[in-house]
Image (cartoon, rainbow, N blue to C red):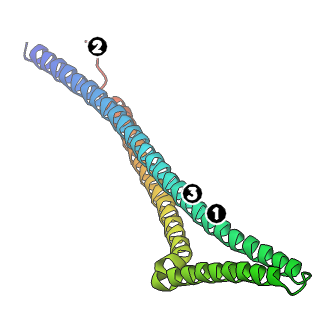
Amino acid sequence: MCSATSKGEARQLDNVASTFQSWVGRISSVLSIVAAVLGLGVWIFSSFIQTQRSDVISKELTIRNDQVIKFIVEYQSKFNDVISRISALEQHILSISNIPKEDTLYIEMQKVSTSVSDLNSRESKIESIILESPAKALEMPLLRRDLDNVKEAQQAAVVSLKESVDRVYDLNKWLLGAMAVSVVTLAAGNLLKPKETKP
């Protein structure tokens, strides 16, 4: 009777051990799945953040480029206007040189003198703007520096993204390692489980 009781206790212990091993296997499987899902979530979140950051930088570059183009077009049109006025005055002076020296010459010279003084005043205004406000004269190099800074920020963002991908890759290696260890643990538990002997 004592041997029957110890065999029953041994069976109960074997049942408890096999139940424990099966629960450990299930828990390790669930933990491996949770770790894989968390790794995937971290990767998706970091990809989303990087995409948003790239969009903001590209929008800022577009705005800066538009400002530079507007600045160039505005001052190009002003200089073209001055050049066209100067050529009109040259043409006018050439046409006056063919007129006999009479009163009409004096009148035309007055017009030329007025136009030249107008051009001189406009030129002095442009010159004074540049001298009084060197910021406008230096705006192009400053915009170039800003574009270079944005470029450096973009390159830093690319490096940061690469580091994030490397971290996620390392995390995935750890998770796969954990799953492999849990599989090995389950297999070892099944192999080391004592075989039930039939009475």
Q: Amino acid at mark 2?
A: Lys
Residue 198 is tagged as 2
Residue 74 at x, y percent in the picture: 61, 64
Kind of residue sitting beneath label 1: Val
Whole-percent x, y for residue 86 in the image: 75, 77
Instruction: Please give the residue where the numbered disc 1 appears in the rendered image.
Output: 73
Q: Which residue is mark 3?
A: 66
- Would you say 157 lies left or right of 81 here? left
Mark 2 surroundings within 10 Å by alpha-carbon count, few (fewer than 14), some (14 through 19), many (20 or more): few
Q: Nearer the viewer, residue 122 or 118?
A: 118
- Identified by mark 3, the residue type is Asp
Q: Earlier in the sequence, mark 3 or mark 1?
A: 3
* Precedes in sequence: disc 1 or disc 2: 1
* Residue depicted at x 56% and y 72%: 144
Disc 2 to disc 3, C-alpha distance: 87 Å
- Above or below, 137 relative to 157: below
Q: Which corner quadrant holds the N terminus?
A: top left
